[in-house]
Amino acid sequence: MQSSEVLTNVRAPKVARARRLLKRGFRESDGLFLAEGPQACREAATAGKVKELFLTQEAFDRYAEIVSAIEASGAEITVCTEAVIEQFSSTVSPQGMTAVVQMWDQNPSELFKPGTKLVVALTAVRDPGNAGSVIRVADAAGAHGVVMSSDSVDLFNPKVVRASVGSIFHLPIAVGQELDRTIVAAREAGMQVLAADANGVSLYGGVDLAKPTLWVFGNEAWGIPAEVLELVDAVVSIPIYGQAESLNLATASAVCLYASAQAQNA
């Protein structure tokens, strides 16, 4: 594409259609969401979910392999100015590339197939950065999937997508779920259910981490609801050896999930 084909009109209809996806109601009605940055766009392309790609001329020249993959899938490619990209960016410094991506449905029963060893459940996690980071950790630790409660942040929130750095395209994620039903499904699949909380048995020696496990993580500010804690097999805490009051959600999930992954793969 040549510079003469670059979209400069920030009020163009296609720009307006992309911009509206910053709001959850429009994402749900359109069945589409935004993925910002080269890594997220690359993973979306690999998953075959991209409907349209907006990118600057610089990004077009730099990421030819991403553009080729998306173009081969039949998706529309729109080279545009940075001003256009800024119209539907949720970041202060846009990365010059944003994809409009098709949503997908995930059957939560698929998360608890025979042989499933590690699943993550998020309850009342409202911060999109935290949610995306935990999804990224779950992906890195080899979890089989993630369950998000109905009172957690929207999976397709741009900040969740960005914080996951493409991991939302790698593993099954069931959204809008009730944790009591999730726990029942996990037990029926032969899994133990552990909740990460400040007041519990030690992660190191207090539980058998080699067993197939559903890990439950809660809101960073107020933790896991009492009614959920009553349903789990054990409440587990991470020892604090220094003077820090606690660990943030992403760090705590990384410690717990890697401890399970190591024990299960020993």
Image (tube, grey):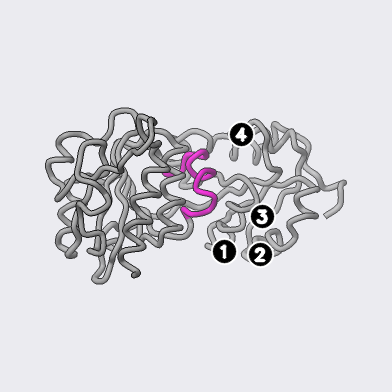
Q: How many marks?
A: 4
Callout 2 touching callout 1 (CB < 8 Å):
yes
Kindly report which numbered mark, 1 or 3, lies closer to the viewer in this rendering: 1
Kindly report which numbered mark, 1 or 4, lies closer to the viewer in this rendering: 4
Instruction: Name which quarter of the figure residue 265 lies in.
Output: bottom left
Label 1 – label 4 distance at C-alpha: 24 Å
Residue at label 4? 91
Residue 136: percent from the left, percent from the top?
Answer: 46, 51
Disc 4 residue crowd, few under 14, some 14–19, many 20+, Cα 10 Å: few
Look at the image and give the residue range highlighted in magenta: 155-168
Say which residue appears at 63% left-offset and 58% top-offset: 75
Residue farthest to the left, as pictured: 230
Residue at label 3? 76
Callout 4 touching callout 3 (CB < 8 Å):
no
Label 4 – label 2 distance at C-alpha: 25 Å
Residue 109: percent from the left, percent from the top?
Answer: 25, 61
Callout 3 touching callout 2 (CB < 8 Å):
no
Q: Is 171 left, or right, of 36 in this rendering?
A: left
Callout 1 touching callout 4 (CB < 8 Å):
no
Residue 258: percent from the left, percent from the top?
Answer: 38, 56
